[in-house]
């Protein structure tokens, strides 16, 4: 593999900002000027960290894309005009042995689309990622609703001389199209020709994480020295054997494996690795810990101090535990977060407190709770499931699932090949959560989600749901097939199951719920993608697709709700 060739060394922008705010690992992180602390600060000046010699590499998303064919459209497709995209798709169809591909492309039931995905940092072969689909400008397709993305391959691409040049194939994608249900609450002409396939991509290769050594420090000896110090602190189980995470590859690059504790928080992992001490002063580690203890007690310097203490490891646990009793919520959170990654379950209660009360800390608090795999962590997360905040509740659900997907509370059921369904018997306001991110999934908070009499809604183009009294009639009318009909209680859970059982898909069920909420027939709140922004990183695919609605009153029911507009302490 060819490793990255860094630019001439300069301090990364993100690290410069962290230094300015005293929230990173490099640079002074102390502000008191007492003689005792001045002496301790002088001691810290003699310390050199991994981050003084390196910059992180591999935390960006990698864009991959390609032309593809969507089928199953209700005469809303088009014959694509000549151009590099049509040429690329025809070449792919011919390679797959498609007979008369031009006739297929000319059908009104098909459309050429441009597909893109973003491979997340640290992903592994077989990991799933989200897919975005869009009809190119100048094509006559009017809607992608009800369509199916045919299997296609994605590569890094560039257009050179009006010809699409692609690199290595890095992903494969296919699946039913989910026309964006939350962009404007209603489907306008642009949103009809854009769609998502949640978790529709599969990575074909691993993505590395590592450290780039600054140009002035490059040598084989320095690379090995840095790797040795990192490996004294961090280990991972790699192909069944426990070993150090750092693998010095060249004089400029150190490859890093990821310990399981940090699998879902790669930015923190790399920050902590860069806080590992390479040179410590003659006074020793004990004196450094004294200095960091002082810094940890100050809300301004606590985040940086907590990272350095976490990098020290077990010796820092007593200092971190003391600050769990601090009067300052930010200090308690900084200490609790570091303790979670050091295996201390006493942090669970304090992390749950931060998830409820400190909105800025919520993503990190939930991520840290997801590594406390004992009764303390599970109990803290279960209590958060009854919160008023949709993002706190769904974030707690995802953290519980990461801890143990076999827990009865989160195990759920598979509805055919369409999606997963989870019904949580918890207190709190009734909430229905649907995803466009990572996988097709419904999570019902509460066991009852009734629908009002008089609703007539569509679920895709072939399924109709009619509510009369306490009964819902779900009917499917498909050309060339016998009509199908079933009756279920007028409850959203039963109706979603019926839609899938009768032949519908995840986009059909989402459309039904959106229409029910828009017409005020659904008493429960309906939310989409209510994950804290930094919980596990949103790829660029979601930046424009996610609509924020922060002007709605608390408790409002709306068809357009990404789950972040209402918080009990925001």
Image (cartoon, rainbow, N blue to C red):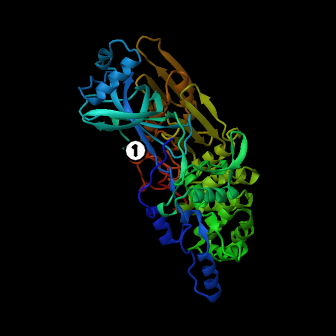
Rendered position, 2 above or below 53:
above
Q: Is residue 8 visible?
A: yes
Q: Nearer the viewer, residue 527 or 116?
A: 116
Coordinates of residue 471 in the picture (x, y in percent)? 55, 28
Query: Residue farthest to the front?
Result: 220
**In which quarter of the view is residue 306 placed?**
bottom right
Q: Left or right: where does residue 328 sit relative to residue 529? A: right
Residue 268 seen in render: no
Identify which residue, 276 or 375, lies in the foreground: 276
- Examine the image and state in which quarter residue 369 appears: bottom right
For disc 1, the neighbor class at 10 Å (few under 14, some 14 to 19, many from 20) is some
Q: Vertically, is 295 above or below 406?
A: below
Q: To which residue does mark 1 refer? A: 545
In this orientation, which residue lies closer to the viewer: 484 or 416? 416
Q: As drawn, is 353 to the left or to the right of 440?
A: right
User: Which residue: 43% across, 45% down?
Assistant: 542
The picture quadrant where one finds residue 276 is bottom right
Judged from the image, the secondary structure of the residue bearing numbered disc 1 is loop
């Amino acid at each position: 593999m060819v490793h990255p060739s860094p630019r001439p060394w300069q301090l990364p922008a993100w690290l410069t900002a962290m230094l300015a705010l005293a929230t990173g690992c490099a640079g002074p992180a102390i502000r008191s000027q007492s003689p005792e602390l001045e002496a301790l600060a002088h001691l810290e000046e003699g310390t050199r960290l991994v981050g003084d010699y390196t910059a992180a590499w591999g935390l960006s998303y990698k864009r991959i894309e390609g032309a593809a064919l969507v089928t199953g459209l209700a005469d809303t497709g088009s014959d694509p005009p000549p151009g590099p995209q049509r040429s690329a798709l025809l070449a792919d169809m011919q390679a797959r042995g498609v007979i008369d591909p031009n006739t297929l492309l000319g059908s009104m039931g098909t459309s050429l689309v441009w597909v893109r995905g973003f491979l997340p940092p640290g992903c592994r072969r077989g990991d799933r990622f989200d897919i975005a689909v869009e009809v190119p400008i100048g094509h006559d397709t009017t809607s992608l609703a009800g369509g199916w993305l045919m299997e296609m391959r994605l590569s890094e691409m560039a257009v050179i001389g009006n010809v699409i040049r692609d690199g290595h194939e890095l992903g494969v994608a296919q699946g039913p199209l989910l026309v964006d249900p939350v962009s404007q609450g209603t489907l306008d002409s642009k949103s009809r020709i854009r769609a998502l396939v949640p978790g529709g991509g599969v990575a074909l290769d691993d993505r590395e994480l590592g450290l780039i050594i600054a140009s002035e420090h490059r040598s084989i000896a320095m690379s090995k020295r840095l790797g040795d110090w990192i490996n004294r602190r961090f280990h991972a189980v790699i192909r069944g054997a426990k070993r150090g995470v750092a693998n010095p590859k060249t004089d400029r690059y150190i490859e890093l494996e990821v310990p399981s504790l940090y699998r879902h928080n790669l930015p923190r992992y790399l920050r902590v690795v860069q806080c590992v001490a390479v040179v410590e002063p003659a006074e020793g580690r004990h004196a450094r810990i004294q200095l960091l203890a002082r810094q940890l007690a100050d809300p301004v310097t606590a985040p940086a101090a907590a990272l350095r203490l976490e990098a020290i490891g077990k010796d820092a646990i007593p200092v971190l535990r003391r600050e769990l009793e601090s009067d300052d919520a930010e200090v308690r959170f900084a200490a609790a977060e570091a303790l979670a990654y050091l295996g201390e379950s006493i942090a669970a209660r304090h992390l749950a407190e931060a998830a409820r009360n400190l909105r800025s800390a919520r993503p990190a608090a939930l991520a840290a709770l997801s590594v406390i795999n004992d009764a303390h962590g599970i109990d803290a997360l279960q209590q958060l499931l009854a919160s008023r905040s949709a993002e706190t509740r769904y974030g707690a659900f995802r953290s519980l699932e990461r801890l143990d997907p076999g827990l009865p509370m989160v195990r759920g059921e598979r509805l055919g090949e369409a999606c997963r369904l989870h019904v949580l018997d918890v207190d709190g306001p009734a909430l229905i959560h649907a995803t466009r991110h990572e996988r097709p999934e419904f999570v019902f908070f509460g066991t009852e989600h009734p629908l009002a009499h008089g609703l007539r809604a569509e679920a895709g183009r072939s399924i109709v749901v009619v509510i009369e009294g306490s009964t819902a009639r779900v009917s499917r009318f498909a050309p060339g097939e016998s009509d199908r009909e079933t009756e279920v209680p007028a409850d959203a859970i039963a109706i979603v199951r019926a839609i899938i059982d009768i032949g519908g898909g995840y986009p059909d069920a989402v459309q039904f719920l959106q229409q029910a909420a828009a017409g005020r027939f659904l008493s429960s709140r309906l939310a989409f993608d209510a994950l804290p922004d930094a919980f596990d990183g949103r790829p660029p695919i979601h930046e424009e697709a996610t609509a924020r609605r922060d002007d709605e009153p608390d408790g409002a029911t709306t068809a357009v709700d990404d789950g972040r507009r209402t918080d009990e302490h925001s």
